[in-house]
Amino acid sequence: MLQLIEQINTAVNNFIWGVPAMICIIGVGLLLSVRTGFIQIRKFPYAIKTTIGRMFRKRDASDGSMTPFQAVCTALAATVGTGNIAGVAGAIAIGGPGAVFWMWVSAILGMCTKFTEVTLAVHFRERNADGDLVGGPMYYIKNGLSKNWQWLAVAFSAFGVLTVFGTGNATQVNTITTAINSALLNYHLIGESSVNISNWIIGIIIAILVALVLLGGVKRIGKVTEKLVPFMAVLYIILAIGVVLLNIKNVPDVFYSIFYGAFNPRSVTGGLVGSFFMSMKKGVSRGIFSNEAGLGTGSIAHACADTKKPVKQGFFGIFEVFMDTIVICTLTALVILCSGVSIGYGEAAGAELTIAGFTSTYGNWVSIFTAVAMCCFAFSTIIGWGLYGARCIEFLFSSKVIKPFMLVYALVAILGATADLGMMWSIAETFNGLMAIPNLIALFLLSGTLVKLVRTYFETEGKES
């Protein structure tokens, strides 16, 4: 049965992430970039100034909403996760070092894509029956397009409900168990025979913690993420920079392998990864898995922000993709490639490859810190995607099904702790692609609305900087 599922998923995955998907994802990102005058580059200093300035402005949000800082932390909580750790490792193993280059390309275009998603989500959002602000692709499709396109909103929400269980939960828990077990094994606190028992214990504990946070509503989610995200990001970045500095002599060769391998992977991987398209596919797909640009999910959190300026909130989308992919994913790639750990090109890999990069540089003691960082990354992602799933299922049905959904979502953590990683990643990647299709169509159709919103914003602000 599992073999049949794997065969079906592989066929669907190859179709979704084939040439048409690459054209659509890159094409829509390029279209939005051209129509906004490459706002992600032209206005990058303004975006950083605007977002950082608002992130640390302490104030309470109105009922049913988050502060802009809590909204960006919740969105970052969902994006900064195993895509940055296990996803990058998997992309390098299957696509070669050149996959990192294609991650960068997807990120540059993805900055504008996510800017568009956030701006439209805030502009077209609503208040639900409980008085909470709700928005995202399903709402900008519903309120921004004609009734002929309403099926897109339903399709996005349906795929979203299915996606959160794999992308947002199971793969994240699998990374947590890998990190914790690596630390326990390194310190001989458990043996190989005890790993399965450890997985069950970890899965049950995570399920309980997830339920406690998510059932507390949007306010509790915001309070948890605004404390967890800055801590985990700073800790991980410091550890990663340390690896790069201690292996600084390898950096020039690593960047050469990234750029040269992007177009000629066979020469860098010894022929084990010989396909240019495979390198591109893995880089783009895992980049999107990490920063979510094109999926539209991050905009669901931003729609909860207590703000009256959609475009101003949209700049957080640029900031998020920059931090997630350009900074954190790049550092992960450098940890793996600079440390000199053995990479089994052509074979599936996950968090264990990134952990090996840290431990080969610092020694086994660092496995404790990497375990903590990875647990924070993954747990925050589970929380963020829990909110996304709740909003999707609410759109399909009603707010009455949110709590039952969250209980089921929490229990999936147990499955994630004990299931096979390879198939899990592949299925999550497939649902990501399915989710992106209705969102990309909507972004294409609403690109004119975005241009008007951007023009009006800068005319009102009176500072084209």
Image (tube, helix red, strand yellow):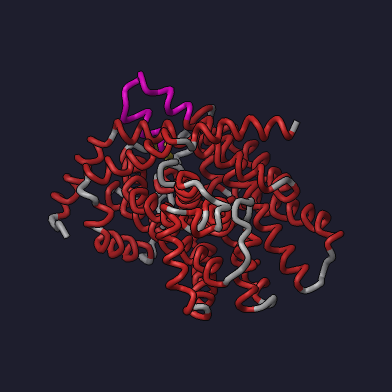
Task: Please say if 52 is above or below 266.
Answer: below
Q: Nearer the viewer, residue 142 or 220?
A: 142
Residue pictured at 47% horizontal, 32% vertical: 156
Task: Please say if 341 is above or below 154.
Answer: below
What is the total number of numbered labels drawn onto the structure image? 0
Q: Nearer the viewer, residue 261 or 224?
A: 261
Is 456 on the left or on the right of 425, as rendered? Answer: left
Task: Please say if 157 is above or below 189.
Answer: above
Residue pictured at 47% horizontal, 63% vertical: 328
Report the predominant secondary structure element of the magenta stretch. Answer: helix
Is 309 on the left or on the right of 246, as rendered? Answer: left
Magenta region includes residue 145: yes
For the magenta stretch, what is the residue range?
A: 136-155
Residue pictured at 56% horizontal, 72% vertical: 339
Give the quadrant of residue 401.
top right
Give the percent coordinates (x, y) of residue 408: 67, 39
Give the percent coordinates (x, y) of residue 354: 60, 64
Is 239 on the left or on the right of 71, as rendered? Answer: right
Residue at the far top: name it.
148
Q: Is residue 203 visible?
A: yes
Give the quadrant of residue 345.
bottom right
For the C terminus, which image quadrant?
Answer: bottom left
Residue pictured at 27% horizontal, 60% vertical: 44
Give the percent coordinates (x, y) of residue 370: 62, 69
Give the percent coordinates (x, y) of residue 142: 37, 28
